[in-house]
Amino acid sequence: MPQYLVLIYDDEAVRSAANPEEFERLMKAHEEFCAADGAVIRGGNALQGADTATSIRPDSAGGFIVTDGAFAETKEVLAGYYLVEVAHLDEALAVAKRVPAPFGGVEVRPIRVFE
């Protein structure tokens, strides 16, 4: 059965400005999502903020450049993900629409299978 990654993006500034009650509601919404859709969830996690990211890129000398932070300056950053296993994209989209993402949105991408 195909697997899809549901990437959760949010605006960290908006999330950090949320009051504790809003954050608690968000955590409860994720718990409820996992309970309702647990049969198709194969994994998932929340990520630390973009300020904790380390980026690695090859340089022209065959080495690497390691820098603090994400690759690009964007308003929304990757905040977490769920790996789901469903029969087809339409089902993955239906699941993704239920993922709590009040500070941004989600992206659905199929997992590439190499043979």
Image (spheres, grey):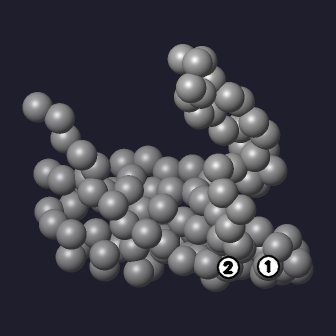
Residue type beneath disc 1: Val
89 and 30: which is toward the camera: 89
Residue 28 shows in this picture: no
What secondary structure is found at the residue carrying circle 2?
Answer: loop
Query: Picture quarter containing residue 77?
Result: bottom right
Q: Residue furthest top?
A: 62
Question: Could you tell me which residue is drawn at 54 percent across and 17 percent down?
Answer: 62
Residue 64: give x, y in percent of width and height.
62, 23
Disc 1 packing (10 Å; few <14; some 14–19; many ≥20) = few
Q: Earlier in the sequence, mark 2 or mark 1?
A: 1
Image height of 107 relative to 115, above or below? below
Residue identifier under label 2: 103
Question: Could you tell me which residue is drawn at 54 percent across and 77 percent down?
Answer: 105
14 and 35: which is toward the camera: 14
Question: Could you tell me which residue is drawn at 67 percent across and 79 percent down?
Answer: 103
Mark 1 and mark 2 in contact (Cβ < 8 Å)? Answer: yes
Q: Residue furthest front?
A: 60
Residue identifier under label 1: 14
Question: Could you tell me which residue is drawn at 61 percent across and 78 percent down?
Answer: 104
